[in-house]
Structure formats: C-alpha cells, structure tokens
Image (spheres, helix red, strand yellow):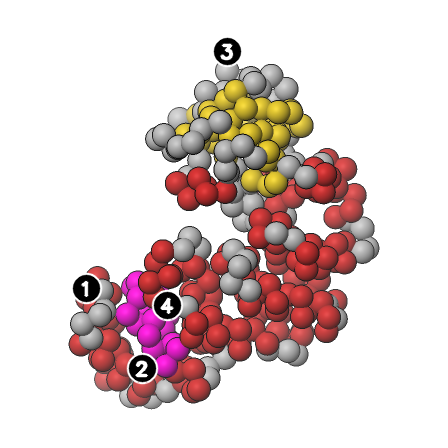
Amino acid sequence: MAKLFFLPAFAATLQPPLQTMRNPEFTLIAAERLDQAMIEQRIRVQVLERLRGDAAVPDEIELLILDRDDAYILPGQPYLLVYSDVQRVPGKPRTLVRNPDRRVLLHIDGADPAVFPDTARNRELLSISHHELETSDNYIETLIGGLALGSPPEVDLWSAELAIRPAFFEQLGPDDLEVVRNVANNPQMRPASRARLLLAALDASPNLGVHWYAASAQAILKQTSTQLELAMPGMDHLIYTALLIAQTEPDPQGRVAVQKWLQSTPPLAENAALALRAIDPALEVEAVTLAIEHKGTPEVTRQMLKDYLRRLKRMRLSSPNA
C-alpha cells in the first residue's frame, strides 16, 4: 500500500535551497549515469551510495529529467543527485503519495537541477549537519567564499543562498561586492545565478549606496545577441532582469543596447520598450515603430508591438502628460 503524508510546509514558503534539499521526503544519492542517450526524458543511473532519504533505493533506477538536464549528467562520472518520488493525490491537493516508479530529479531555485559533482566538499555541503553553519555568525563568509571559488553549479547554489538573505547585502564590504559583481559579469556562470545577484543588488541598492549593477545590466544587453538569448537556457531571464534594471536606472548612452531587444520575444520586447520610455517617451514610440517595420522582427513580436503601440497612443491621447 502506498505511503501517504502531508504536503511539506516548505512548499508554501520560500526557503534557502540547502534547507529545502534537506527535506526528509527527498532522497540524496551518489550515482553514476548508465545511459548514453536520454529516452522519453528518462535516464538510468547506478546508485553508488544511499546518503539520505529512501534507504531501499535499488542499485539501478530510472530518473525523470528535463531535456536541458541531459548536459549536466554525463555518463561515467559520479554525481550527487537529489530527487523526489512523491506526487499529489487527485482531489487531495495537500496529500502526497510515494511512487517509487516515478523518481523525478529535483529542480528548485539554486539547484536547477539538483546535480552536483561527487566531492567531499559537496557531500559536506548537502549533509544534515550543514545547517549549523548556515545559522552561524560567519555564514556570510562561507557564501562569499563559495561564490569566489565554486564551479557553476555551486555558484548557482551560493547565489540563491545569498539572495534569499537580503540583510546580508548590507554587510558586504568592497571586496565582497567585487566577488558578487564578478559572478554577475561572468558569462561562464549560469544565467540564473547572474540574474539572481543583479536583482538582489537592485533590491538592496537604497542601503548599499552603490549602483554597479546598472553598468552590468547595460553590458549584458549590449554583449548578448538575441540568437543566444533564444538558444541558451535561462538567458531570457537574465535579459529580462537587465531590462528591468534599465527601466529603474535609465541611461541614454545605452539606448542602442536596449533597442535591439525590441526584435526579440514579446516579453523582452515589451520590457525593452518600457526601458526606452524611461530614457525618453518620444524614443519609445520611434523605436517601437521602427521595430514593427524591421524585417528581422519575429512576426509574433511584431503583432504584439502593433497592439502595444496602439495602446500607447490611446493612453497618451487620453492623458497628454503620460
């Protein structure tokens, strides 16, 4: 008979990723991929060690993953994997049932996916005892050290651990801020990590008194092509974040870098228009009109911009000062 239990409390609240991964209903294993190819979003892995959670995990299991996860789990290399084998009971949204035939790789903010190289350092990081360090007075030093020295998966985790603790940003000294800025500016890091730190810096700016993130956002908008944004996972979120910052920190010098995103996806095009409005409302109308006429603008974006321009003109007719 399937084991029933209530929906874990963390699902209703935002928690640091390390705390979330320690939920007792998740399973942590050391494993090695056996497949060369993913079949129907499933891969086979050999369980090398059962570290936490279900102690009855078989020696070989199938793991459900997303298409983009395939590049993060290479055959012949040991990894630490966190997965869930629970699902909601139909008609009882707060009740879950364990389903050992459906093991799903965990995806949360900061562990997307929850895949880490199997090293002594990462084993310690994912251990139950690590929570003592997370509540210590010097945890901020650990966070900055992880951002400075970690690989992309580790930096993604540390960036989420830092971003969810906004009070920490007020404690960052010049050297610490330089570490954060280096991650945000590093194209080798995951786009989600960079976006997360830029947003955290934006939120903390009234207390920081330092607006370095504005220059970082402009550089990202300038240096990234619209083709890369469509091809690289998470890049759309980074560009969206950079455009949001461009709205709050308008820079006439960056108008060209902003304007090219009018020829991207509809959400990015709309935010590019708003960023241009922050620079100059007349520039917004001019740039949107040119993007509609440009042959390189995707048709779905062109139609959105036509509707956007009609709404904009109606708004300004009804409120000339808008």
Give the label, 2 or 1, closer to the camera.
1
Q: Is residue 5 left or right of residue 40?
A: right
At label 3, counting other C-alpha atoms closer than 10 Å, the crowd grade (few under 14, some 14-19, many 20 or more) is few
Q: Earlier in the sequence, mark 4 or mark 2?
A: 4
Residue in the image at 26% along x and 78% along y: 288
Which mark is drawn over residue 1?
3
Q: CA distance from mark 1 to mark 4?
A: 18 Å
Residue type for callout 4? Ser
Q: Which residues, given as a range, are shown in magenta?
A: 256-274
Which mark is drawn over residue 225?
4
Image quadrant of residue 183? bottom right
Residue in the image at 68% along x and 39% along y: 119
At label 2, counting other C-alpha atoms closer than 10 Å, the crowd grade (few under 14, some 14-19, many 20 or more) is many
What residue occupies the far top of the structure in this picture? 1
Q: CA distance from mark 4 to mark 3?
A: 53 Å
Q: Which residue is mark 1?
A: 299
Q: CA distance from mark 1 to mark 3?
A: 53 Å
Q: Which residue is mark 2?
A: 284
Instruction: Locate residue 225, reporting x and y percent.
Output: 37, 68
Residue type for callout 3? Met
| Mark 4 and mark 2 residues within 8 Å of each other at the beta carbon | no
Element carrying mark 1: helix
Residue in the image at 71% along x and 59% along y: 144
- Between 317 and 38, the one lying in front of the other is 38
Q: Earlier in the sequence, mark 4 or mark 3?
A: 3
Instruction: Locate residue 218, reporting x and y percent.
Output: 47, 76
Residue type for callout 1? Glu
Q: Earlier in the sequence, mark 2 or mark 3?
A: 3
- Between 191 and 10, the one lying in front of the other is 191
